[in-house]
Image (tube, helix red, strand yellow):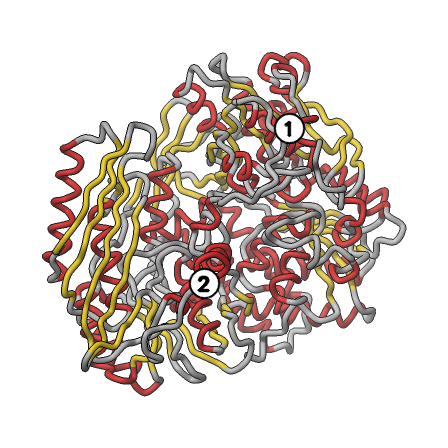
């Protein structure tokens, strides 16, 4: 038991980090995986924060050998497509102040990242919250401040809230927000996918509710478990998911009741869909995802950076090295079909400092982890 | 600024100054290419990329180090650029085993328009830090540049000390233990919270302090049992351990639960998606000790006001040389090296 | 995909709450939380916005979920007995 001095609730929260309970849940996970009797059993989570938690707590080392937990297209940093990054970079080089979450600064577009633009003299400010981006615009009335808004529906709701509030004239939004359910459809429909169950992201489901997954389960006949982000949440979520696979009962199970209800946060949904509309778009390294991108509706054109500015992408694209993206197999990696070593760019043209595909961009991406550590190292013996 | 064609030549970015792999690569590729051999074979020169240099003169070592400080904001909870410049150099000398400072230099570069009262306040805290460290500024230099040519103030300090025994950052072998002299993450998070206007209220203050007295206590208690020391500044405990592991050719297993982290730092790190093991410290040391000397050194550290929370946090193994394996209490993973500037994350 | 952190509400003023995250405090915007929030409540924070009020009893409910997971294991499994003891201990507090 971790014996740090913590408040009562933190102690109860610690129950979600208690190593002894974790070890017991790992044994349940091993037992049920064996009972399925196939190897490997592939399940997928679609959330960067799940991968972050799995990595942070070192859980991957505890998963049964026969259970393949695949990181799906769930990290907004890595699936934001190159043209969207290029739009942010172009506006920065055209003299706008770009306010962005810290995650996006290193991500390269076709040629440059926001960090590169900053090194050339552009102004890029890191913000922790959308409200901070608005404050930035108030502090710099003589500059156009563009909020490079990234992230899934959970983060898009915060952007929606500020778009509906009273804004200074020099503030606009460049939306690169994504919506996850359509991407799950894409992966589930891929014929060669061997995913037998999904671990759904707890915080996104806090907004959308878990009811949204019922039609998905009806159509694809594979179970979905909604899980939180503490070690016990993830282990319990996976144990429940593997049980559903064993019993062949495709249903939706909510293992995160402290945050997720069936209908979700209705107020947030109303704000989200009053400001954004879903349209089709390419996710980096995957494919065209119908209804996967969120763009500002017409009634908010006055704060839409794409309509306020002519974004000069041509200047970025001439003199650009040949597109390597065509050879990138991140889409197959995120769908559980290939591994990093199947890609001919891996470790050559595509390296952490010059990432091509989504799985090398994210610090938790499969390619980044394989490049740094050489596959999933077996450390338990050390 | 018109739309420019893509610049073909490579430019220096912030990543090259953040204490991680990119910085070490830049130093090796640019600065260490055309370096002459050391005066005598056992000298510690620039190629060692240690916290300082050690030159054998007469019957003892003269240890030299230099550091530039460009922290923003200039005044921050727990200290300022003045205190930071003195402590940074005193601590680098101490990491080489030289805890009696012979003299410090101080080069100041000021921007036209910099407030005199701010300069006086910075000088006062430099004097205070010197008193704490038992050190004196023996010479200096002052320059002023035009408005906009530099951002406020830059301080460079160099330090000279003598010692009979130099402690490197590369002497670890299998079975040795690693001690950290206190809680990690205080400095980096105090700066981050102040810099990005994150409006976090709480006890987030830099730990900047001269630790030459603390290191002296450890050396007298452990003697030759103290075999490696490193300053976990930029890149935090993770960078320090990776460098020590790579230079010593050992693997290191770090017990995450054993690493002391103050509550506000842990809370802020969780909120911002940052790992405290990657965050800079300015009043801590990472000390490699033989197993049989570990308890004596730990006891001496904890008896010192700056070492109350010292803890044994890791051990050296033969497997996976150059890597740091983190035992999280749930499972084991390879600890990543920090890359580039620490930024708040949302995913 | 979304870093969410729980915290305890210290005070509330129009549209914002002062929230304690076990060591640091920060103001959190209440525009998109779907229930009224009062001091002492727990909220889930994401990028400076409260996206959920976490009822204290829901935390206990999550623990009960573990019970169902372990309950289906054969009762002679030593592990089950340990965890049941621990979960009931939680309930008593």
Is A349 left or right of B189, judged from the image as shown? Answer: right
Can see residue A260?
no
Residue A77 — which label? none
Q: Work out which quarter of the rendered image holds the C terminus of chain A and state it.
A: bottom right
Residue beneath the point at 25% across and 65% down: B64
Residue B34 — which label? 2
Residue at the extreme bottom of the image, as rendered: B292
x and y, in percent, of residue B109 in the image: 25, 40
Is A243 left or right of B174, judged from the image as shown? Answer: right
Say which residue label 1 marks: A87
Can see residue C17?
yes
**Nearer to the camera, B182 or B107:** B107
Q: Quadrant of residue A314?
A: top right
Residue beneath the point at 65% across and 35% down: A208
Q: Work out which quarter of the rendered image holds the N terminus of chain A and state it.
A: bottom left
Near mark 1 (Cα within 10 A), the count class, few <14, some 14-19 or many ≥20, is: many
Near mark 2 (Cα within 10 A), the count class, few <14, some 14-19 or many ≥20, is: few
Front position among marks 2 and 1: 2
x and y, in percent, of residue B266 in the image: 39, 53
């Amino acid at each position: 038991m971790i014996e740090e001095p913590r408040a009562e609730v933190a102690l109860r929260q610690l129950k979600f980090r208690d190593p002894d309970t974790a070890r017991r849940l790992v044994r349940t996970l091993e037992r049920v995986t064996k009972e399925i009797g196939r190897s490997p059993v592939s399940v997928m989570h679609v959330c960067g924060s799940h991968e972050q938690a799995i990595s942070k707590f070192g859980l991957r080392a505890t998963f049964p050998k026969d259970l393949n937990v695949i990181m799906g297209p769930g990290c907004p940093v890595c699936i934001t497509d190159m043209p969207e990054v290029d739009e942010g970079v172009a506006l920065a080089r055209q003299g706008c102040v770009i306010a962005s979450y810290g995650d996006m600064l290193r991500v390269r577009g076709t040629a440059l990242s926001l960090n590169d633009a900053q090194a050339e003299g552009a102004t890029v400010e890191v913000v922790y919250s959308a409200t901070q981006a608005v404050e930035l615009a108030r502090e710099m009335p003589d500059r156009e401040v563009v909020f490079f808004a990234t992230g899934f529906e959970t983060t898009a709701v915060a952007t929606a809230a500020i778009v509906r509030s009273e804004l200074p004239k020099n503030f606009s939004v460049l939306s690169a927000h994504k919506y996850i359910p359509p991407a799950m459809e894409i992966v589930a429909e891929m014929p060669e996918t061997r995913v037998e169950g999904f671990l759904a992201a707890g915080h996104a489901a806090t907004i959308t509710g878990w009811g949204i997954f019922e039609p998905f389960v009806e159509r694809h006949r594979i179970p979905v478990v909604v899980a939180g982000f503490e070690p016990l949440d993830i282990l319990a979520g996976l144990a429940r998911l593997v049980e559903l696979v064993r019993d062949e009962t495709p249903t939706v199970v909510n293992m995160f009741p402290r945050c997720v209800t069936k209908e979700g946060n209705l107020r947030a949904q109303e704000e989200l869909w009053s400001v954004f509309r879903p349209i089709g778009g390419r996710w980096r390294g995957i494919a065209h995802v119908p209804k996967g991108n969120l763009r500002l509706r017409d009634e908010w054109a006055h704060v839409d950076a794409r309509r306020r500015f002519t974004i000069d992408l041509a200047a970025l694209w001439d003199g650009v090295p040949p597109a390597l993206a065509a050879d990138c197999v991140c889409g197959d990696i995120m769908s559980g079909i290939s591994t990093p070593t199947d890609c001919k760019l891996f470790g050559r043209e595509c390296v952490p400092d010059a990432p091509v595909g989504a799985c090398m961009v994210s610090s938790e991406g499969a390619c980044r982890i394989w490049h740094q550590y050489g596959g999933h190292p077996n450390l338990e013996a050390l | 600024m018109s739309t420019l064609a893509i610049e073909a030549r490579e430019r220096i970015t912030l990543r090259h100054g953040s204490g991680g792999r990119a910085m070490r690569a830049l130093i090796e590729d640019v600065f260490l290419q055309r370096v002459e051999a050391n005066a005598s074979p056992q000298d510690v020169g620039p190629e060692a990329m240690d916290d300082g240099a050690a030159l054998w003169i007469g019957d003892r070592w003269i240890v030299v180090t230099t550091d530039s400080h460009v922290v923003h904001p200039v005044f921050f909870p727990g200290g300022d650029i003045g205190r930071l410049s003195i402590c940074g150099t005193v601590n680098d000398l101490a990491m080489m085993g030289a805890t009696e400072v012979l003299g410090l230099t101080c080069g100041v570069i000021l921007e036209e328009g910099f407030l005199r009262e701010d300069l006086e306040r910075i000088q006062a805290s430099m004097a205070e830090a010197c008193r704490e460290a038992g050190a004196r500024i023996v010479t200096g230099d002052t320059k002023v540049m035009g408005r906009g040519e530099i951002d406020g103030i830059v301080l460079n300090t160099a330090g000279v000390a003598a010692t009979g025994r130099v402690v490197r950052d590369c002497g670890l072998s299998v079975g040795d233990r690693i001690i950290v002299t206190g809680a990690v993450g205080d400095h980096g998070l105090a700066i981050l919270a102040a810099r990005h206007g994150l409006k976090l209220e709480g006890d987030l203050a830099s730990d900047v302090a001269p630790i030459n007295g603390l290191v002296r206590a450890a050396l007298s208690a452990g003697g030759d049992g103290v075999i490696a020391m490193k300053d976990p500044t930029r890149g935090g405990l993770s960078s320090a351990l990776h460098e020590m592991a790579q230079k010593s050719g050992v693997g290191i297993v770090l017990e995450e639960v054993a690493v002391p982290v103050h509550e506000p730092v842990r809370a802020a790190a969780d909120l911002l998606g940052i790992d405290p093991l990657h965050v800079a410290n300015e009043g801590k040391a990472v000390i490699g000790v033989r197993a049989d000397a570990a308890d004596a050194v730990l006891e001496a550290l904890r008896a010192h006001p700056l070492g109350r929370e010292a803890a044994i946090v890791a051990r050296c193994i033969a497997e996976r040389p150059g890597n740091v394996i983190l035992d999280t209490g749930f499972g084991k993973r390879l600890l990543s090296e920090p890359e580039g500037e620490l930024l708040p994350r949302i995913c | 995909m979304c870093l969410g952190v729980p915290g305890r509400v210290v005070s509330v003023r129009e549209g914002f709450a002062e929230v304690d995250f076990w060591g640091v405090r920060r103001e959190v915007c209440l525009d998109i939380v779907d229930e009224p929030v009062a001091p002492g409540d727990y909220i889930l924070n994401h990028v400076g916005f409260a996206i959920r009020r976490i009822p204290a009893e829901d935390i206990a409910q999550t623990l009960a979920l573990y019970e169902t997971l372990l309950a289906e294991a054969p009762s002679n499994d030593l592990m089950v007995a340990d965890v049941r003891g621990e979960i009931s201990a939680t309930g008593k507090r």
